[in-house]
Every structure is written in C-alpha cells, then in structure tokens.
Image (cartoon, grey):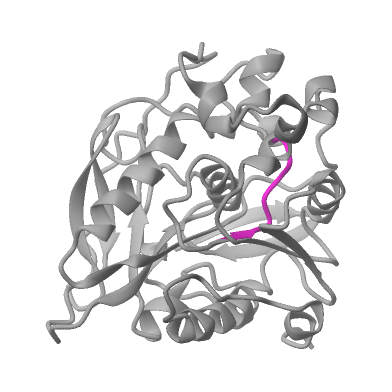
Amino acid sequence: MIRPCIIITVVLLAGCNREPPAGPPPTLPPAAQKERPSSTGQSLAEARKGFTTKLARRESAKTPFDEPPPRIFQLVRFDAPAGKLGAYLSPDPADGKKHPAIVWITGGDNNTIDQGCWREGPPQNDQSAGQYRKAGIITMFPSQRGGNDNPGVREGFLGEIDDVIAAVDYLAKLSYVDPNRVYLGGHSTGGTVALLAAESTDRFRAVFSFGPVADPSGYGPEYTPFNIHDRREVELRSPIVWLGSIRSPTFVFEGAGQGNTDQLEAMRRASTNPKASFFAVKGGDHFNILAPINRLIAQKILADTGPTCNLSFSPTEVNELIR
C-alpha cells in the first residue's frame, strides 16, 4: 500500500502503515533528562506496576483485517491483556523442524496492520520486512489494542507493549518455532515500541529497533492519545528513561542523513548499558537502511544457533551496506 508522507522532503511511503511526519526532535521532559534506572534501581516493568493511564482520547480503528495470501501469511488471533488480537503469521513449513522467528512491529499506526506486510516496497524504502520470511524465518506481524477490529483502545506506547509481549508468548508455543530463538524488530513508531518492549522483558533473544525516538510525545496527536503534558505519562513511554532495563542484546539503527538521528545520539549518550548498541548509518536515511540491514540481520539470525545469542554488528559492517 502506498501512502503519501512528509519526512523533511516529500517522499512516497511504501510500507505497512502511514508514518508520522519527521521534524525536530521533541524536547525531553525534565525527568527524562535526569532519571535513569541505573540510579533509581527501578525497571520499566516495576515502574508500570499499578499505573493506570488517563487517556486524552479514546480511539479505535474499527477496520477489518485484509485477508493475506495463504502461501505467505495466515490471519491468527492471539490472547493479549486487551483480548483476542489479530496477527499475520507465517504458515507452518511442515518440515518437522523448529525455526527461528521474529515479531515485527510496523511503522506509523502500528496498532493496525494491512497489505503492506506482504507488499514489498522499492529497495530504498521497503518496510515489509520481507527479508526475514524469504530467509525462512517465521514472521509474525501483531496488531495491537484498538487497531483493526481488535478490542480495546489505543494507548500510544503503553498497553501496546503488553500486546507485543503476548504475541511472542503465542509465537514461542507454536510447534514449528524454536522458543529459544524468537526475536523482535520494528521501524519508526514500531521501533519505539520494540525498544520499550526490550526494556520491559527479556523474552526476546535479541531486539532490532530502526529509527525510534527517545520520547514519543513529539510524534503529534495522531500517535499520542495520552496527555503529553503529564510527566509520568510521558516518562513511562520514553525509551531514554529506561535504557538500563534492557537485558537482551538490543541493536538500534538509524540513517545518519535524515530521520531520528538526534534521538539515537541522545540515547547513545544516556546509555551505560552494554546490552544496547547504537548505529548511525552513514549515507542512510529513515527508510533506505531497512532492506539491506534487515537482510544482514536475517543472515545473522540463521547463524545464531548456539545456546545463547551471539549476534554482533560493527559500524563498518553496517555502513558498507549503504553506498
């Protein structure tokens, strides 16, 4: 599906969902600039216990799921805190083997999924993450609360994290999935969700976050149904505050040319966690890094067969992918 989008210059967006416009990095709230789990000793999961969001708006898409091509995906429903949620899932290869798998969170309105999950974009802007399924990696695109015809309402980077964790629990129980080799990835708003999920659980073998932000309150009203002026509401949705909570290897990528590079650098400076690695890709932008780096990640996932994750990347390695 191709939809118009503005990101510094006008581009055509081919992907699963419409992207929020990119602009100046949002100003971080005072708490986000100061508070760190390493100093407070509190994890994101602990901080969220007992917290109930007070939404500024209650929204749900009420949009039916597009029926996927059966040879590529099947539409499944998985149990999540918000209720039964839909997802596109690779079918069983029926080869008797247990395969590595990845949960992928789309950009834009990631609560809703659509045909962009199997319709590939051009090489300079392919948001389909098709490099994983083509490599034989089981792929799952979960929708989240308030998206498509799902129950619940959109919370914007809060309850959605619980839905993503529920998706991996579902995926890990499938007979054709290796439960010890389930990964998580996402792009843009989906990259922010993926990073928050990495800060909330160690259920993923590794996490790949493309173009996230340090604080989502700058995304704009379409993606922020919460009160962006409430410090606690923003803190619990801001990846920069909880980088010390990451326990699985987590790799954050953004193009150094255009995109959320300032956000990535802010998180790099704030982080003292060796589990988190940050890459500003020379010659890259918010979109053209996706296809080549996802292809590289897929190759590394196939080789990551040991008892623990052995994935690693170097700046030289990723920079050479963008010419």
Which residue is rendered at x = 47% and y = 86% of the image? Answer: 303
In the image, taking residue 97 as reference, residue 26 lies left or right, namely right
Which residue is rendered at x = 66% and y = 57% of the image? Answer: 275
Q: Position of residue 8 (x, y in %)?
A: 81, 55
Which residue is rendered at x = 69% and y = 42% of the image? Answer: 244
Q: Is residue 66 visible?
A: no
Above or below, 66 relative to 46: below
Image quarter (top left, top right, bottom left or bottom right) of the C terminus:
bottom right
Q: Which secondary structure is most common in the magenta stretch?
A: loop
Q: Is residue 214 magenta?
A: yes
Q: Nearer the viewer, residue 34 or 256?
A: 34
Above or below, 127 relative to 231: below
Write down the region rendered in magenta.
Answer: 208-215
Image quarter (top left, top right, bottom left or bottom right) of the N terminus:
bottom left
| Quadrant of the image occupied by residue 100 | bottom left
Which residue is rendered at x = 69% and y = 29% of the image? Answer: 217
In the image, taking residue 94 as reference, residue 86 lies left or right, namely right
